Image: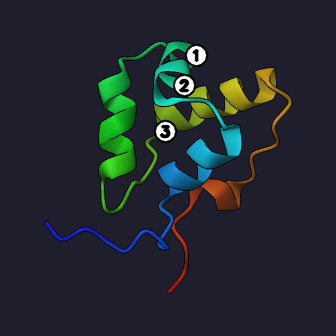
Amino acid sequence: MQRLCQDHKTPWRKVYEKIGLSQAELARAMGCHRSKISRALGDDEGLIGGRDQLLLIKVARERAIELSADDMLPERR
């Protein structure tokens, strides 16, 4: 699998950067293992599933961070 250039931000990368927690902190806040976050950030498509979207919205809301639908969608090419 070919890695995309780092300029391409997947939905997971956009949301991760916007929330601003470390992988371990985000995993704890979402109630999952850090490896899940690591795999999601390393994935070329980085699409966010429904359950993860809800958890990310909850984590962001608890930290007064506004997430938009565009943050969770792939960039248009």
* Above or below 64: residue 6: below
* Above or below 57: residue 11: below
- Foreground of the two, 53 or 16: 16
Point out residue 53 in the picture as x, y percentages from the top left corner: 56, 38
Quadrant for the N terminus, please: bottom left
Q: Which mark is residue 50?
A: 3
Name the amino acid, label 1. Ala
Name the amino acid, label 2. Leu
* Above or below 13: residue 7: below
Q: Is 7 positioned to the left or the right of 66 in the image?
A: left
Q: Nearer the viewer, mark 3 or mark 2?
A: 2
**Mark 1 → mark 2, Cα distance in angstroms:** 5 Å
Q: Which residue is mark 2?
A: 26
Q: Which residue is mark 1?
A: 29
Question: SS class of the residue under badge 1?
Answer: helix
Q: Which mark is residue 14?
A: none
